[in-house]
Image (spheres, rainbow, N blue to C red):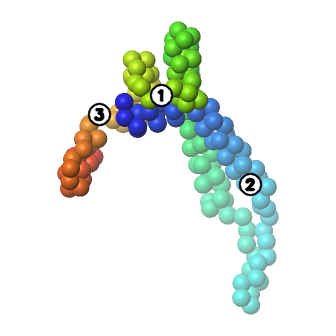
Amino acid sequence: MDAFQIMEIKRYFRLGKRISRVEARMKDLEYEFHNQSFYPQSVELGDDLVNMAFNIEMNVVPFVDTIEDLKRCIDRLNDKKLHFDRYLNSLPPIEKEYLVNKYKHGLYDSEVKRIDEALHNEIMEIEEMINFKFGYPIEFKKNIYRKCNSVLGNVKNMAEALGV
């Protein structure tokens, strides 16, 4: 397994924290929005005194869109966490303890075992399921990590993987 795959596994062990951060951000946005003044205000612009009112199109629409995006994000993260936890709970206790200690607490060395590969494969299946459920395009697995000795070769590999 490469560093990217290990990082992806560690990210799944932190899904609960990510959900909490997104929920906290949503609460902060709601608090800021509802605690602003909706009444017209008189503002001095140069020598003129101008009345400015709360602009619904400029304030409400982006707020509602942002809240809906955050709710969809929370739904995706909750689905990922649900399926990830189900998988972990289906493992024998000793394997679950090994994975938690290795990826959440960093207690084991970097030796890759069969269970590490199985965990990464399960994460890839969860990602594919989430993409399908929420209507995201399914990613084609291309080997974009082929390393060349030249910068131009690496750029060509990236362009090929992106379909350019």
Q: Nearer the viewer, residue 73 or 162?
A: 162
Amino acid type shown at disc 2: Glu
Q: Nearer the viewer, residue 70 or 58?
A: 70
As drawn, 121 above or below 146: above
The label shown at residue 32 is 2
Q: Position of residue 2 (x, y in %)?
A: 37, 34
The image shows a total of numbered marks equal to: 3
Q: Position of residue 125 (x, y in %)?
A: 41, 24
Amino acid type shown at disc 3: Lys
Amino acid type shown at disc 1: Asp
SS type, badge 2: helix
Q: Which residue is mark 1?
A: 109
Q: CA distance from mark 1 to mark 2?
A: 45 Å
Q: CA distance from mark 3 to mark 1?
A: 28 Å
The label shown at residue 141 is 3
Q: Position of residue 97 (x, y in %)?
A: 57, 17
Task: Kindly give the residue lying farthest to the top in the view shown.
Answer: 92
Residue 147 lies in quadrant: top left
Residues packed near mark 3 inside 10 Å, few (<14), some (14 to 19) or many (20 plus):
few
Residue 39 horizontal side relative to residue 110, left or right:
right
Residue 39 horizontal side relative to residue 125, left or right:
right
Residue 36 horizontal side relative to residue 74, left or right:
right
